[in-house]
């Protein structure tokens, strides 16, 4: 009796231990750790942040902390102009600002943490979506497992590397909306509508351009609510559901209407215009590959994944599954199997949207980047397709085994008993295969991307600028900058980068050194607003500062001996500028700053 | 009140941050859980759904809701906003349980 009790307790504990939810959380943790490991979370300096956009995102968090608001650009970003209405939607910057303020950790750490967990949310969302659709935990676990380190590396590398951080956060909101959408269609739970409303409003506050993708699903949702209310002949039902879905987004859109009409309209808002039918070649350009494409293509998805997904799509459409029956010889049976078609329709809509909407829209830049979501749209279908294939192959193997067995009945019952274990083993094997295939690419990318955009010595020079240079003083970054890292000096900075420097050198002779330059730009062009707020409902577009400048327009000149040959060139210019009234005020580890004493 | 799930969530966030930040990772996970996750956790725990569903919804709602804290604390500089932000959902939940 006692033994039995012990055994039953142990079984119960084991079941509790092996709960699928814990496994998915483990997948979530693994994905989060892998994504963070790519850039790491350096506390000393933002060294390993990739691409210039990431600097802009981290600085947007610091702007909230430094200026205690998000509505206007910081002084150095707006090039000294006040009330330049910020183009960056505030939500995730504010969240990261809270984490930074309360923990004392740098903004690039807290924001990257949020970005990585947002990307890792896909692991859980894939499980929930697939479970909702096919009501099979094993298929759902497979879909989730495939998402930990998707194949190929560019699938996850693209959003994390290229610096579309707030769009990554937006992607997780889109996926959450899609999950709630199919859940509502199936179960009609009114709380789903409230959370869909939260997803919509959060998306507006995170990456407002992405809201275009949800436009048609929202219309479909509205029609469904109307139809249900009409069936029930209940106006209260209509009012309640309409309020649950629309109240928060409506309040938000009303509050942000000036931003939509005057600020965002000039940026991502251009997308919403429908003035043309044209083919934008760059949207389908495969030559522009760094670590991945600027606009991912269907070619990013492995062929085998596409083929198996197509198999699943066909089976869902015809509502059939193929079975092998083993009684009295092998029989192939085509069985009726009504799959949920809602995800299929969403996937078709998604692919049409990200590949065809750009023919009609004025500036389809962000829609092209939305294609980063395409593998995730396919994973639930891929998991189903893999399982259908497995079932078919397993059926053939079983029938061969039964035929070969001397006791077919016993063999059949043994195989039936082992069916669950076989399926679980298949799921585990597929996940391990996919992760191990992706692992090599992952390791290589981590090695390749180990370089730093901002070294510790460079970071220390920015810290020196922060404490020694007045906020309204301008710095010329002379000769060696192309990733906007100078923005971290938090002073108005003119960039005189590689190309301009080369052109300038050609014109320089020993006795004729011009002090006039053509800048490659003013630091922070991408996140900088061009819209000046004059008052309530009054905005004006203002031009950028002139790029033709004189050396004397700057209070400081910053030199960086980035390449071996650069030191001699910099030495030459530093000694020449010193004859023009500039004084060397900082010289540490190849980073030198001259002060204009004129 | 699903304190167990709250602690599980804290453990999950810590597991992601600690390999890179050490003890500071625990601090980051705690701040995230306290100010972003927890204020919505108690309300969402009232919905009859599974742990994973609740985990995702709480994160999404929390990341949106905490913007209010940023406005109160960072922009308006209301000193007690941090305490209030954590205390209000706790008080509401405790009082609703006591009423039962």
Image: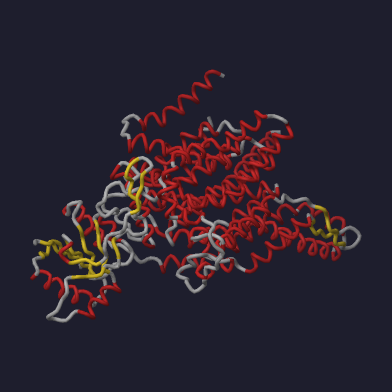
**Whether residue B72 is situated above or below residue A381 in the rendered picture:** above
Q: Residue at x 54, y 34 (%)?
A: B44
Residue A314 in picture, x, y percent from top left:
74, 60
Residue A427 visible here:
yes
Residue furthest to the right: A328
The residue depicted at 53 percent of the width and 22 percent of the height is B97
Within the image, what quadrant is residue A378 found in? bottom right
Q: Determine which quarter of the picture holds residue A521.
A: bottom left
Tell which of A531 and A153 is nearer to you. Answer: A531
Residue positioned 65% across, 39% down in the render: A12
In the visual, does A133 lie left or right of A203?
right
Q: Is residue A367 rendered to the left or right of residue A428?
A: left
Q: Which one is nearer the viewer's eye here, A93 or A240? A: A240
x and y percent of residue A520 in the render?
A: 30, 68
- Relative placement, left or right, of A189 versus A595 is right
Query: Residue at the top extreme?
Result: B99
């Amino acid at each position: 009796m006692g033994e039995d009790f012990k055994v039953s307790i142990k079984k119960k504990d084991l079941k509790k231990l092996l709960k699928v939810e814990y496994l998915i959380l483990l997948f979530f943790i693994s994905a989060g750790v892998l994504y963070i490991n790519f850039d790491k979370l350096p506390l000393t300096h933002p060294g390993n942040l990739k691409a210039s956009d990431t600097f802009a995102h981290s600085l947007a968090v610091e702007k909230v902390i430094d200026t205690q608001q998000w509505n206007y650009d910081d002084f150095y970003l707006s090039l000294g102009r006040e009330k330049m209405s910020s183009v960056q939607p505030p939500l995730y910057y504010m969240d990261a600002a809270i984490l930074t303020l309360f923990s004392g950790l740098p903004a690039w750490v807290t924001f990257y943490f949020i970005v990585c967990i947002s990307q890792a949310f896909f692991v859980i969302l894939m499980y929930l979506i697939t479970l909702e659709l096919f009501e099979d935990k094993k298929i759902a676990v497979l879909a989730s497992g495939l998402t930990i380190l998707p194949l190929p590396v560019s699938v996850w590398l693209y959003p994390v590397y290229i610096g579309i951080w707030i769009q990554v956060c937006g992607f997780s909101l889109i996926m959450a909306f899609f999950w709630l959408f199919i859940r509502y269609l199936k179960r009609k739970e009114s709380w789903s509508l409230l959370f869909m409303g939260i997803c919509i409003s959060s998306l507006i506050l995170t990456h407002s351009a992405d809201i275009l993708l949800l436009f048609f699903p929202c219309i479909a949702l509205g029609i469904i609510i109307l139809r249900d209310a009409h069936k029930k002949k209940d106006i209260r039902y209509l009012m309640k559901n309409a309020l649950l879905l629309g109240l928060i987004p409506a309040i938000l859109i009303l509050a942000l209407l000036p931003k939509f009409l005057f600020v965002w309209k000039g940026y991502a808002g251009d997308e919403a215009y429908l003035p043309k039918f044209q083919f934008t070649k760059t949207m389908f350009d495969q030559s522009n590959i760094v670590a991945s494409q600027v606009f991912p293509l269907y070619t990013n998805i492995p062929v085998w994944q596409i083929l198996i997904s197509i198999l699943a799509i066909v089976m869902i459409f015809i509502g059939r599954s193929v079975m092998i029956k083993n009684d009295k010889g092998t029989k192939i049976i085509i069985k009726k199997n009504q799959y949920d078609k809602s995800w299929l329709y969403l996937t078709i809509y998604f692919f049409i949207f990200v590949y065809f909407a750009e023919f009609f829209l004025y500036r389809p830049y962000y829609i092209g980047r939305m294609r980063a979501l395409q593998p995730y749209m396919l994973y639930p279908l891929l998991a189903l397709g893999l399982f259908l294939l497995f079932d078919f192959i397993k059926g053939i193997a079983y029938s061969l085994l039964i035929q070969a067995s001397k006791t077919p009945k016993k063999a059949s019952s043994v195989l039936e008993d082992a069916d669950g274990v076989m399926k679980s083993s298949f799921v585990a094997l597929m996940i391990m295969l996919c992760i191990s295939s992706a692992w090599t690419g992952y390791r290589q990318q981590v090695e390749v991307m180990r370089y730093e955009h901002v070294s510790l010595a460079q970071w220390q020079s920015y810290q020196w600028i922060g404490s020694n240079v007045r906020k309204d003083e301008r710095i010329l970054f002379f000769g060696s900058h192309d990733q906007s890292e100078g923005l971290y000096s938090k002073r108005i900075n003119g960039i005189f980068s590689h190309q301009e420097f080369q052109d300038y050198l050609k014109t320089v002779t020993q006795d004729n050194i011009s002090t006039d330059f053509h800048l490659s730009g003013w630091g922070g062009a991408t996140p900088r607003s061009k819209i000046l707020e004059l008052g309530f409902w009054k905005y004006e577009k203002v031009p950028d500062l002139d790029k033709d400048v004189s050396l004397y327009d700057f209070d400081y000149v910053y030199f960086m001996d980035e390449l071996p040959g650069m030191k001699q060139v910099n030495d030459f210019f530093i000694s020449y500028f010193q004859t023009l009234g500039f004084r060397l005020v900082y010289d540490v580890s190849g980073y030198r700053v001259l002060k204009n004493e004129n | 009140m699903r304190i167990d799930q709250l602690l599980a969530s804290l453990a999950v966030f810590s597991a992601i941050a600690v390999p890179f930040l050490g003890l500071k990772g625990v601090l980051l996970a705690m701040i995230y859980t306290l100010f972003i996750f927890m204020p919505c956790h108690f309300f969402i725990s009232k919905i009859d759904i599974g742990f994973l569903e609740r985990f995702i919804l709480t994160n999404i709602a929390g990341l949106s809701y905490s913007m209010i804290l940023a406005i109160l604390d960072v922009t308006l500089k209301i000193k007690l906003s941090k305490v209030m932000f954590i205390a209000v959902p706790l008080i509401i939940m405790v009082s609703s349980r006591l009423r039962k």
